Image (cartoon, helix red, strand yellow):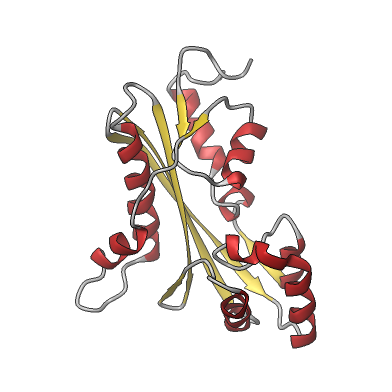
Amino acid sequence: MLQKSGHDIILASNSSGRAALLKGAGISFTKNAADLDERSIQEALTVDGVCPDPMDVALVLARAKAEVISQTVKDAYVIGADQVLALDDKIFEKPANMDIARNNLLKFRGRTHYLHAAICVARNGETIWQHVETASMTMRDFSTDFLAQYLAKAGDSVQTSVGAYRLEETGIHLFEKIEGDYFTILGLPLIPLLDFFREQGIVAS
C-alpha cells in the first residue's frame, strides 16, 4: 500500500470531484463537510469596497474549512480546499441557474480568466500546511449557437462548477488555451499535497 496505516485523513468537503481525485491517488479518507457561511467570510475580506485578492479568498476559505473540522477530530489530518474564479477584478460564484451560467460564459468568451485553487491541511485545530496554485483559462470566441448546444448537453451540471463547465467533460469544448496544472483546474492541487504527505510519512516515499 502506498498509504501507511495509522493516519486518519478527512476531506472537509462534499465535493465528489475532489473525493474522486483523492480516491484515484489511493488515499483512504472520510468526508466531513464544513458548514461555513462563505459569502460572509468573503465580505469580511473586502476593505473600503475594494475586492480582496482572489488567491487570499481561496486560501482563507480553505483554511477555515480545514480548521473547523480539525477542532473536532483529534490528531486527524484534515484537508480543506477552495477554488476561486476571477476575471479582471471580479470574483465569480457558482451560477444559481441556467441563465446566470449563460451570461457568465458570454463574459468569459474570447477572454482569459483565472482559477485559484487553495489547499490546506489542519491538525488539532491549526493549519500545518497550505498551498495555492493558479491556472489561466482562455475560452475561444464560440458562437451563440454553440453555447446553446453546450448548455443543453451539459444540463444542470453547469451549476455545480464556478465556471459553468467541467473540463473533464464537455466543458473542454469551450477552450482554446489552458495553462496550469490539471488537478489545480479540478480544484485540488494533488501533487503538492502528496509531497506533503510523503514528508509527514503518511504515504510511501
* Towards the viewer: 53 or 28: 28
| Residue extending farthest bottom | 144
Q: Which quarter of the image is occupied by the N terminus?
A: top right
Compared across the picture, whether 26 is left or right of 46 comes to right
Query: At 40% from the left edge and 56% from the top edge, which residue is drawn?
Result: 58
Residue 138 image offset from top left, x and y in percent: 63, 72
Query: At 48% from the left edge and 27% from the top edge, which residue is drawn?
Result: 197
Query: At 34% from the left edge and 26% from the top edge, which residue is drawn?
Result: 73
Compared across the picture, whether 103 is left or right of 45 comes to right
How many numbered discs sit on the rendered protein? 0
Q: Which quarter of the image is occupied by the C terminus?
A: top right
Locate residue 199: give its quadrant. Answer: top left
Locate residue 108: give its quadrant. Answer: bottom right
Residue 49 image offset from top left, x and y in percent: 24, 79
* Towards the viewer: 128 or 159: 159
| Residue extending farthest top | 5
Query: At 71% from the left edge and 78% from the top edge, which residue is drawn?
Result: 140
State whether residue 145 is above or below residue 1.
below
